[in-house]
Amino acid sequence: MSQRITIDPITRIEGHLRIDLEVDNGRVARSWSSGQMWRGIEKIVQGRDPRDAWAIVQRICGVCTTVHAIASVRAVENALELDVPVNAQYIRNMILCAHTLHDHVVHFYQLSALDWVDVVSAAKADPLKSARLGESISEWDGNSLAAVEATQQKLKNFLASGQLGIFSNGYWGHPAMKLPPEVNLLAVHHYLQALEAQRWANKIVATLGSKTPHIQNLAVGGVSNAIATDSEGVLTIERLEQVKEYMDRLYSFVFNCYFVDVAVIAGSYADWFSIGAGVNDFLSSPDLPTDASGTAFMTPGGYTPGGDHGAFRPMRSFGDSLLADNVAEAVKHSWYTYKHGDKPLRPWNGETTPHYTDFEDEGKYSWVKSPTFMGKPAQVGPVAAVHAGLAGGHGPTAKYTQSMLSRVRSLTGHEIAPAQLNSTMGRHAARAIRACVAYEALKTNWQMLMDNIGRGDKETFNEPEFPAGESQGVGQVEAPRGLLSHWVVIDNQRIKNYQAVVPSTWLSAPRNSNDEPSSYEVALNGSAVADPARPLEPLRTIHSFDPCLACAVHLTDIRMQKTIEVAAL
Amino acid sequence: MNDTNSLSRSGAGCAERAASRIVVLGVGNLLMQDEGVGIHAVQRLRSRVQLPEEIELIDGGTSGFDLLPLLENGGQLIVIDALRCGHAPGSVVTLKDEEVPAFFRTKLSPHQVGLSDLLAMLSFKGTTPASVTLVGVVPSEMSCGMELSPVVSRSMDHLLATVIDELARLGVRCETRH
């Protein structure tokens, strides 16, 4: 019997995403990924001073404020061919690394763990077994019996209060939940500790960015943090020492708790390394520049077709023609219309004219456009970044990939190949690998900044100069969710066109002009669905991409409805 | 759910309930007209009203976890947001304590994911705010744009007065800037 399952909205994500599944004999036969909100950011910044755009576009999304701000200043700097003082690069790099750590920790514990961890089972666990298990698997010092017992008591109080329902779509007792009670309890314990750890990452961003949730310190040409060794209200050595203190507190959680937990969950659900592969061509950006012109990077990025490291094509600078010449957006299956037919448009020439038709299985069905690289879909995100790191000879990526895969092997006895990172579980593993890379880079940038200040260099800003006439630029960031690019056309110091091509657009897009699906749909096809009314398996796969649709689109319609509908076909 | 028009608010007898810390948190998307009314309200409170030091006035945008430290230390929380509830556009509506997460559960607000999840996590952790009040405005226009609709603009004074009344109820007197 065939059934149609509609999940709308997907919860525990940012933004509004609808997923439709046609299920045949317990397997997904067809899928549709549909962004339910409309995007039109360029209309707001058109005609404005390009130096002001970053402060506006960071409002696109409340989760990714920082990376939108950085992409925007980089786009304008690229158009103006403007160098950025290395101190400013280091400060931006540290903000990006801390933001990435924040995102990955929160994504694993707060947004995904409940797909794998049964909270109700944790209440029945023996806390002594949990504490002993915790002490046996890692050096994390937060696993004492007293601490684990305190968590279990909180959990029991919470369950007794009858509020469990607020963790919507938690599928307690589902047959796909496999962890023993003591592992569930340990995971719930770390869930609470992660709420503390994410604050330290957040404080790093806040201290360097002058404020969160919306950083204040960016400028086209650098950062507005004046560096001083004494006065108040600027980036002092004292503040940088404070940043160091937050970094130190974060270290143990990332390496001894988060990284280890991902390996344990991955080892317990190792079959999910063979489920949920997205598009197998990978695209990422080099990032963490260490020179003024953005040609030397700490982490490589580029195009890895077929996941083949021998075929890797690196991007060698910001605005590399490999990126600038090869991105286009299609609207054949999106609720937009282009002036001159369905031919995909380069973002600099992008148009955003809405054309709503209703949900058409074979026609238009999403507010998200469909981006392509060299005419084909690409997977962005942590797996793409890890592939680029491995292909580009990046030492830390190789080290932490090996460490993760050997941990999983020792738990399961099975070899997991790097190619299997393109899977539901692999994306969690890749994110943990990337978190360790980000931590190392954060520390290195801190030291480079201190050393540079020590040498007497306090430059943080180059004044932009606008050429007469038209110029265009692309700003690229390897954001936590993957390649983010902002595209700007400047005419006489004013913004003429602006487009943001965001990571979740690459992943959640509807089919492109050749009817090729993007990663969500590819990953869902063939998925098992044991219980159509509780489609935990597809949700695991969707959550593994860390969806953030708030920027891809915006909200037009707020409806009260059931989250999951099942219809016989 | 109460329409604030029907409620009289007075500061009398509330001084003893004044907490050491009060957070007034505007949330919303500044790029989507009335969706950003909470942020507009925070900006206007900042420029028009002299608030005592113990009050933190925060532009929360559409953030989620970044807001956690602000909600966590057991103080009083007033959230200003756009919300839809069947009332006419421009109506100012106040919700209290358990009505707030219950309200977000029915998913009528664009950023319910962030706030309802945060409140759930805090309740799990045992560190919920002492009180939560949501002061909302029913939006009229939510297209791309940084300007409020005329309908919601006309409600702004009523909205600010409602927030100031809430503060008075918590024992805080606010001076208007001249």
Image (tube, coloured by chain):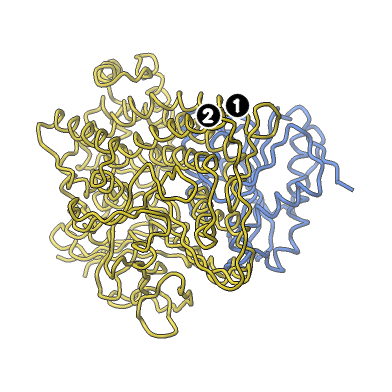
Chain colours: A yellow, B blue
* Mark 2 nearby-residue class (10 Å; few <14, some 14–19, many ≥20): some
Q: Secondary structure at mark 2?
A: helix
Farthest bottom residue in view:
A340
Q: Amino acid at mark 1?
A: Ile
Which quadrant would the C terminus of chain A be assigned to in this image? Answer: bottom left
Q: Amino acid at mark 2?
A: Met
Q: Nearer the viewer, residue B57 or A305?
A: A305
Above or below residue A511? Residue A411 is above
Farthest front residue in view:
A455
Instruction: Say left or right for A94 vs A403.
Output: right
- Residue picked out by circle 1: A237
Q: Nearer the viewer, residue A480 or B75?
A: A480
Q: Residue at x 72, y 36 (%)?
A: B55
x then y, percent, for residue A256:
33, 24
Residue A398 image-quadrant placement: top left
Q: Residue at x 80, y 32 (%)?
A: B13
- Residue picked out by circle 2: A450
For marks 1 and 2, give the one nearer the viewer.
2
Above or below residue A283? Residue A46 is below
Instruction: Say left or right for A296 vs A202.
Output: left
Residue B165 image-quadrant placement: top right
Parent chain of label 1: A
Q: Residue at x 68, y 67 (%)?
A: B149
Parent chain of label 2: A
